[in-house]
Each structure stands twice: as C-alpha cells, then as structure tokens.
Amino acid sequence: MKKIYTLLASIVLFANTSFGQCVIDNSNTAFSPRPDSIPCVERGVAYDQVIQIKVPTSIDLADFGSPIPFVLTVDSLVITNVSGFPTGLTYAQNPANGIMYGGDNGCGQVQGTTNDPVGNYPLDFTGFISLHGFPFPPYFDGDTTIDIATLQTMSTMFNLSIDVIEQGDPCRASGVKDFSAELNSAISVYPNPTSGLVLVSLNAARRLTGSIQVIDVNGKLMQEQAIDVNGQADFSLSLERLPAGLYTILLRTNEGFATKIISKE
C-alpha cells in the first residue's frame, strides 16, 4: 500500500497560469522532490522548481491513523487554486485543467523572484478528491468526496509550505513543517471505536501548551480543549452528541501537531 505522502504528491501543485507548462516524467513513481525537501527560495534570486507528481490508485485510512485498514480507490482529484505563495512567485500545473485520475502522472512548476521577508509560507489548497470503496455502514456508503482543506487537517503530509531565506543562508527544512513525529508517538486515544467517551493520553517529556481539537470529515471544528502539560496527562473528550462517523483528534502545541483518527459508533 502506498503511503499517504504519494497522495499529497497528487494534489500539491497547481492551478492554471499563462507561462509554459512543466514536462511530465511518466516514469516517476512518487513525489520528487519530497515535500520535506523542496528547495528554499532565496530573496532577490530567480526561483524555478519543477515537482513531479504521481497520483496513487488507492489510499488506506490506516495511514491517517484509522484503527482498522480501510482502503479507498482514488477516482479523481481536482485542484482549483493554490494560495499562500510569497509575492512574485507564480505557479502552474500539467495538466492545466487541474484534473488528475488515480494512477496519473503530472507535474507542477513554481517560478519567479520574491523579496518578501524571510520566513515560512504555508500553502492553502482549494479542490477535492473523489474516492470509492466497499460500503461500511453506518459510516460510509461506498462513495465520498473530500475537500483538500479537510485532508490538510487530517494528514501531516498535506501541510506543504515554502521557506524564504536570505541569499547564501542554509536552507531550512521545508514542507512538513509543523508535524512532530515525537508528539505523534507520545499521544494515544482509546477506546477506538468509541460510543461516546474518549480518553486522550499524552506522555510528554517536557512542558507543552496548546489544544486538543475534534474535527469532523468536513473539516469542521466540533470541540476544543486547552492543554498545559508537563509530563504525562490524560484528557477526556465526550463525543456522545456527535453523529456516528470518523473524526480527527488533532493535538496542536507550540512544538508542532499530531493527529489520530477515531471512529464514533
């Protein structure tokens, strides 16, 4: 099963623009370069980066943290807009209409020169992905369409960004900027599935402040609880009033974020 970063590759770049399209490498089998190794943009220096894309034929919700494997087929993916680039950078994708299907190859290109301040510039995506699979009552009837913005809240690999640096400075790590593998291994949620009450256990090696959020499959924030942890701590969340289905438990802290998917019966 392909990991979810290959799905990110299919949605990362980009919408229509007037300059020439990049050339698709049909032999490519993954995102190249990876989201966490996209070269930085030097202020005042022309930038030209081609990113090769491979759309997976299927995804497994276990890659999002689902307690059970749940494979969905990728029917199509539509990108209508990408925003958040530093001033002066333009973007294009091939195919130009922003539509790709499971198994397709594509590419994206970022070009231009910026003098925006040094920093990290997160990218926001507008579009959707259509999926289908075996019905899974009562949560899934066999077909679904998910906004890309929702996927950005569910998967670390959907949080793409570009770094702007001064000329000659070392390039900081780009792309998966805020995800913390350490936090992701330190947080657990149970029982999963749940009929209502969820216990979130966080084993932090130091003090962490932030919040725990519950987000539905449409990207809507259903509830939020502030946290201030120094060591191990448990938090109770009540999902009793929420409809049955899949929810993302999102831990946001000053050091990054972690996600888990939970099923409400």
Image: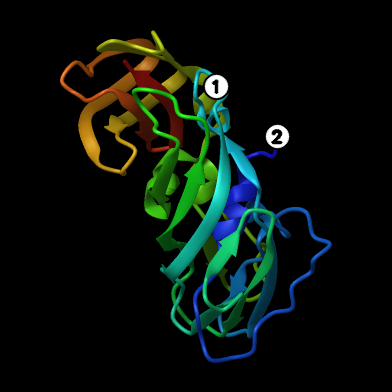
Q: Secondary structure at mark 2?
A: loop
Q: Which mark is residue 194?
A: none
Residue visible at 32% across and 29% down? 209
* Residue pointed to by mark 2: 1
Q: Nearer the viewer, residue 144 or 258?
A: 144
Q: Is residue 114 above or below residue 26?
A: below
* Residue pointed to by mark 1: 185
Quadrant assignment for the N terminus: top right
Q: Position of residue 58 (x, y in %)?
A: 62, 42
The answer to whether residue 233 is left or right of residue 115 is left
Image depth: mark 2 or mark 1 in front? 2
Residue visible at 62% across and 56% down? 9
Q: Amino acid at mark 2?
A: Met
Residue visible at 44% across and 21% down? 206
Q: Secondary structure at mark 1?
A: helix
Within the image, what quadrant is residue 202 found in? top left
Q: Position of residue 11 (x, y in %)?
A: 54, 59
Q: Position of residue 38 (x, y in %)?
A: 65, 61
Residue sticking out furthest to the left: 241
Residue 160 visible in this rendered orientation of the protein: yes
Within the image, what quadrant is residue 213 found in? top left
Residue visible at 78% across and 54% down? 29
Q: Is residue 100 above or below residue 152?
A: below
